[in-house]
Amino acid sequence: MVFLSPAVYVATPQVIVNRSRHIFKLMREDRSLFNNRFRNNLRSVGSSPFYNVLQFQKVVRHAKKVIPHLHVPVCITHGAEDEIVDPKSSWWIYRTISSEHKELHLLPGSRHLVCHDNEVNLLIQTVTGFLNKYK
């Protein structure tokens, strides 16, 4: 089983710090990038129906009950600079899961969308190496 940026803890102080750091970086580098990102974020906040948010929380609650009972090999990867989901979510899963064969990989320069970030090659190598061990 492979987890990519799994969500257990979403709106935490660390997430807010990471998001703020990213916003200030955009502001320093290119004001137009910041303005575009800000408009996109405002649109996305309103685009998630409240019902979907409640359903997501329901799935997370259920997953938290199931995770301790998993015994399959598990690879967890998470961007250390994730601005959506706190990386401590991955730590919680790693500590909670019952599998003897588990790995946790924090990608130091990546944010939430690890498959589209600057360490995608490291991500692919990590996941491929893990899957090859247990095929």
Image (cartoon, rainbow, N blue to C red):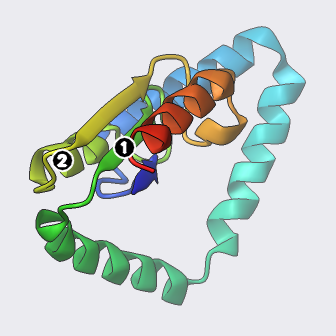
Residue 93 percent across, percent down from the top left: 22, 51
Q: Is residue 1 above or below residue 75?
A: below
Res. 122 image quadrant: top right
Badges 1 and 2: C-beta atoms under 8 Å apart?
no
Q: Residue furthest right?
A: 32
Which residue is more in the foreground, 126 or 36? 126
Q: Amino acid at mark 1?
A: Cys
Which element type, helix, strand or loop, lies under badge 1? strand
Res. 29 image quadrant: top right
Residue 78 percent across, percent down from the top left: 43, 37
> Which label number is shown at residue 75?
1
Which residue is more in the foreground, 117 or 48? 117
Label 1 and label 2: CA atoms lie apart by 13 Å
Which residue is more in the foreground, 52 or 104? 104
Image quadrant in which the N terminus is located: bottom left
- If you read the primary sequence from the N terminus, does the residue marked by circle 1 or circle 2 appear first? 1
- Residue in the picture at 52% in, 21% down: 21
The residue that disc 2 covers is: 92
Tell me if mark 2 has few (under 14), some (14-19) or many (20+) residues whose alpha carbon lies within 10 angstroms of its own. Answer: some
Residue 125 percent across, percent down from the top left: 58, 27
What is the number of callouts on the image? Answer: 2
Q: Amino acid at mark 2?
A: Trp
- Residue in the picture at 36% in, 79% down: 59
Residue 131 percent across, percent down from the top left: 47, 44
Left or right of residue 107, residue 30 in this image? right
Q: Residue furthest bottom?
A: 51
